[in-house]
Amino acid sequence: MTTSKNSLSKKWWKEQIIYQIYPRSFFDSDGDGIGDLNGIIEKLDYIKSLGVTAVWVNPFYASPNDDNGYDISDYRKIMDEFGDMNDFDEMIKGFHQRGIKFIMDLVVNHSSDEHEWFKQSRSSRYNLYRDYYHWWPAEKGKPNHRFSYFDEKGDAWKYDQQTDSYYLHYFSAKQPDLNWENPELRREIYDIMHFWAKKGVDGFRLDAFQFISKDTTFPAFPEGYQDDVVDVIKHHGMGPTLHNHIREMNQEVLSKYEVFAVSEGAGSSFEDAHSLVDEDRNELHMVYHFEGVEIGNGLDDPHTLADFKEVHSKWEEAFKDKGWISIFLANHDVPRMVSRFGNDSDEFRAVSSKMLNTFILTMRGTPYCYFGDELGMKNIYFEDINEYQDIAAINGYKKALSEGKDMQKFMQNLRFYSRDNSRTPMQWDNTENAGFTSGSPWISVNSDYKEVNVASQENRADSVLNHFRTLTKLRTENDILVYGVYQQVEPDHPHIYAYTRSLDNQTWLVILSFVETDANLKLPNNMQTFEIQANNYSQLSIDDGWLKLKPYQAVVLSQKE
């Protein structure tokens, strides 16, 4: 098996280990119950100690917080709850002093309805800012259906009486979609990007970016269309002028700085994904696809290990020669990694967390590690709808009620899959509120914080935290884990995911058990002699060429000459 020059060409952004921080939940420095930029500054040395090389922080711009910062009212101002621009400058300086890159979350598919652009736009059909957004005059009748992720009725068109028109919002009604077909709007966005790049930002994570281009005639969808994941992406994403806009962005902004850009979403096919990031396209740099965290169909039809292996292997195969992908199992929009893909019981939470971190940090592609996963933080599993803070949960509940859904089943799925599971406060120690705040936290702290926290794991050699550090060091020091060719081993094994990474006549073998019982794997002939590079248990049992793996055991072996 060979790899092309493109795939093996070294780029600094391919080699990053990215740590994602949800700032509202990381550390509260002033006792108001909300994490802030000074809280991140106070924890810079901890972040450095993890061995990560870049940090992506979720939005902290000025915002009325309808969607926790993804509804931006001023792109050049810091939200009061998070601090001010001086705090930002100190934060990014602190990261750079520690050799850590900083990635900005750029939200420009939509703004807040409290942004001055939208206030002007909705004031008159003749306002200069009118075409910064998508409007449909009511005299033309109700526009054809478009789906909204956060609307109580799933309807992306909101009637606005002031100008007798509908405006478009693929997310909340307080998040009107920006009109990228307007060159003046695009120029404003490029100016915003220049503003932050000049402040030292090293990369941009482009939120909901596959949706920025729309067919502004808004034709009816074909017969049979449904508001499901596949159809929504296919018919709302990758619009007709998307690539023109991205190439223009690259030319006007990205090419002028030593930065990279990653798009949230990758269209509905490998062709779509490649068209965004292949080097000869001069568009973006890295694909961040969601298929790996969308496997399974709810609690009634959970994913299997075969599903997991199939998804990750097919993306690896599709990008083995061109382009570059992201590797992640968690973020602010999905449940906690160990609850979703491991086993969050008291017995197996730690060891299965170590196993999943081993996966993320040994695959090809740039790894994204979500805050708290280095500890094995798990879902909080809220029981009552009144405990939820997320607009997607609250409006989803209202939508399910209005549609007469089985609410017991809805709540069971929400309890497991809610985005709030990944947004509970970072667990620093065993003091009140896990040491996150001296005040009342904006969202409940997980009740297991007295056992699962940084302080309790810091000095334990066998902790999830220190195993994470072992893995980041291993990846940083060994290019084989970044650029090495991937090949599955025993792909049909029902309980084990095993694969090799090969580079420059070296071969490493990664073996991951996804089961709570013992499991066996026959060592490949070329791996009969090896060195153990990482192991989430203190021992590895071998009998006549067979590995005898303990529950959720994860080992990384290097071929010995």
Image (spheres, rainbow, N blue to C red):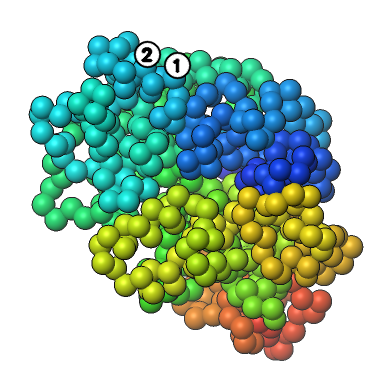
Using residue 393 as the reference point, say whether residue 122 is left or right of it: left
Identity, as a three-letter code, of the amino acid under mark 1: Glu
Q: Give the numbered dot on residue 184.
A: 2
Report the front residue among 505 and 316. Answer: 316
Indicate which disc residue 100 carries.
Answer: none
Secondary-structure class at tag 1: helix
Tell me, yes or no, if residue 206 can be seen here: no
In this image, 457 relative to 298: left or right? right
Q: Which residue type carries mark 2?
A: Glu
Percent from the top left, x then y, of residue 131? 29, 18
Residue 426 seen anywhere in this rendered image of the structure? yes
Left or right: 36 with respect to 110? right
Residue sitting at x 58%, y 81%: 515
The percent position of residue 44, horizontal first and vertical second, equals: 80, 40
Pointer 1 residue? 188
Which residue: 55% across, 51% down?
Answer: 332
Frontmost residue, 225 versus 32: 32
Residue drawn at point x = 13 percent, y = 48 percent: 222
User: Is 143 drawn above or below residue 139 in the view shown?
Assistant: below
Residue 37, horizontal then vertical, whole percent: 71, 35
Crowding near the residue tagged with mark 1, few <14, some 14–19, many ≥20 C-alpha atoms within 10 Å: few
Side of 161 relative to 292 (left or right) = left
Depth check, front residue: 218 or 82: 82
Badge 2, how many Cα within 10 Å: few under 14, some, many 20+?
Answer: some
Residue drawn at (76%, 36%) of the image: 38
How far from the left and from the top, in percent, is residue 547?
A: 67, 82
Alpha carbons under labels 2 and 1: distance apart: 6 Å
- Which quarter shows the C terminus? bottom right
**Which quadrant of the view contains residue 102?**
top right
The image quarter in which residue 467 lies: bottom right
Cβ atoms under marks 2 and 1 closer than 8 Å: yes
Helix, strand or loop under label 2:
helix
